[in-house]
Image (cartoon, helix red, strand yellow):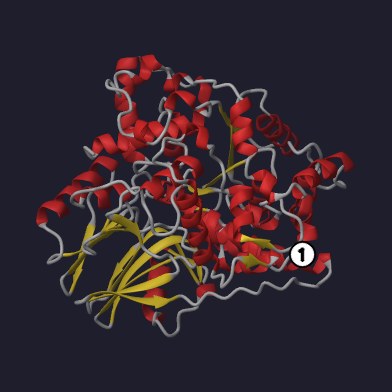
Amino acid sequence: MGDFILYHKDRISPRQVADAFSCLAEQGSENPVSVEHDGYRVAFFPKQISPAQNFTLQENGDFCGSSGTFIYKSLMGEDALRALLQDFTIEAYNPEDYGGIFTVILRKNNRLYLLTDPLGGNRVYENDQQGLWSSSFLAAATATNNLSINKQALYEYIFQETTYGRDTVFKEVSCLDSLKIFEFTKDGPVVHDKNLTFDFRENSAPLDDLVAQTVQMLQDAVKPVSEIFGNKIRTALSGGYDSRLMLALLKACGSTPGVYVYGSNDSPDVTVARTISNGEDFPLDHINKADYPVPSPGGYAQIIQDNFYALDGLPGEGIFDFGANMDTRRKRSGHGHMVFNGGGGEIFRNFFYLPDRNFTITDLINSFYSRYTTAFCQDEFNEQDYRAALHGKLKIALGAKADRLNRQQVEYAYPAFRLRYWTSRDNNNNTRLGPYLTPFVSYALTKQALTIPLALKNHGIFQAELIKAISPALAAYHSDYGYPFDRQIPTKIKIKNNLTYFRPPSLRRYSYAIQHRMGQLTLPKTLSPEYLAPVFPDGLPVMSRYFKIHKIKDAALLGRIHTLEYLFRHFKL
């Protein structure tokens, strides 16, 4: 299935429910399967482009339905749902049995449950009445009265492309805790822990053994999907590690996927992908989004409205493009294809570019979560409050008892914070279209990756070894890092990386601000005055309260500011 709505008929008005359904229809989700339990009603919507069998109903009234892409004990589709329905109890929950990115809602033994994949790759939104839950942020917001702006989440989205913790940009709409299982009773939701466990000790096994263990786990994750979809899988290929590893895995598991690349003709990604496709003799679908037709200013508003609904209001990249974003997403989901995405492959690398020592949560915020400058913020922005809230969210996500983190806990911040809250927004937008997976976002793989010595993650050494072990031929091709993955890392590359590794977090905090001050704004046509005037005839009255718009030189950040203005205007704030 694609989207879903779960609501209690006595805790939310018929008008609110009708508004939520209307919103989902605008987003492209219609004709749901509906089931009921003890005052609750669940509506499971089919995927919009390539439907998949993700619902089963038994004669006794028990049912199981999934949103997203659900894998259970290497099974998919109705087989997986039936197996889960037979096995499921709270006491017997084992996170290692689950794969994919999903939300499952099931009724068993007269009890109703909701659970997401172990790492929380699907977001679930609830309104402040605790009467309605949905995979759609816009649907949950539409079914909520008297919306008001959550200032902390507003700044998180503008600075970091997403919101963290349970927050959304509306105070009255929140996210369910993705590390919990929810049981819906007559008195409301009851929370159960998933009890995930991670070992933060380094694995002392030799490199070859670590590589062999990890390759086997990767193949175990991909092979069941490959066996079901065969060659009806699409995957991107760029100049980096993650897409190369994904392609190697799929080919090793017996699939010949459709391969595509985005970028201009002379971009490094396209150059590398073309070289590989020519050398390995497979077709490559090259899409240059800059070649898409440029609409008239009068027709732009309709494209923005389509982006707004299709991308659930506020995607990380914003909604201001000429339609290429949604067109490519819809096309790659067509004809029953499974779309593989290499997001999360950074679990095998030193994502935060930090050396091997202990750090504080404040250090982590300084190093990666300080992409702003107070120079373009209005007085509404209180930097101390913003950072304190982010600090608290990181501490909760990491399960940390103190501010100081060991180095493996810092590594855990990538899947526990970055992936959980950054990729989950995009996962929802893709899984409503058709089958879609980020295989590297996996509980079992994350546990394994956290034990890999940091020295092997530096400079991409370990991930290069994985590619080489699975496909020496693919590893031998050049990358946009400046070297093939089957060669020693050049010394000049190591020196360059080390300059970042050992730059103090206290200095990194100001990197964005310095770069912004020295930069020049290159405004894309999608944000030019002639195109924005019909959409915002009276400017940006809401976002001007929070930002000095004329001082912003970051086009991507400006795009998100306009996206939020559009969202707030839609809800008449």
Residue 80 in which image quadrant = bottom left
Quarter occupied by residue 347: bottom right
**Residue 440 visible in image:** no
Q: Residues within 10 Å of mark 1 (few under 14, many from 20)?
A: many
Check the picture and name the quadrant holding the N terminus.
Answer: bottom left
| Image coords of residue 176 (percent x, y) | 36, 63
The residue lying at 42 percent from left, 33 percent from top is: 547
Residue matched to label 1: 453
Q: Amino acid at mark 1?
A: Pro
Instruction: Give the camera-side residue of 390 and 174.
Output: 390
Q: Residue furthest bottom?
A: 91
Task: Tell me which residue sits at (52%, 22%) in the image.
Answer: 290
Task: Give the vertical position of 388 relative to 116 (above or below).
Answer: above
Q: Is 45 displayed left or right of 154 in the figure?
A: left
On the rendered structure, is 180 left or right of 221?
A: left
User: Is 494 situated above or below 300?
Assistant: below
355 up-or-down from 327: above or below: below
Q: Position of residue 115 (x, y in %)?
A: 39, 69
Taking the image as drawn, is residue 566 in sight? yes
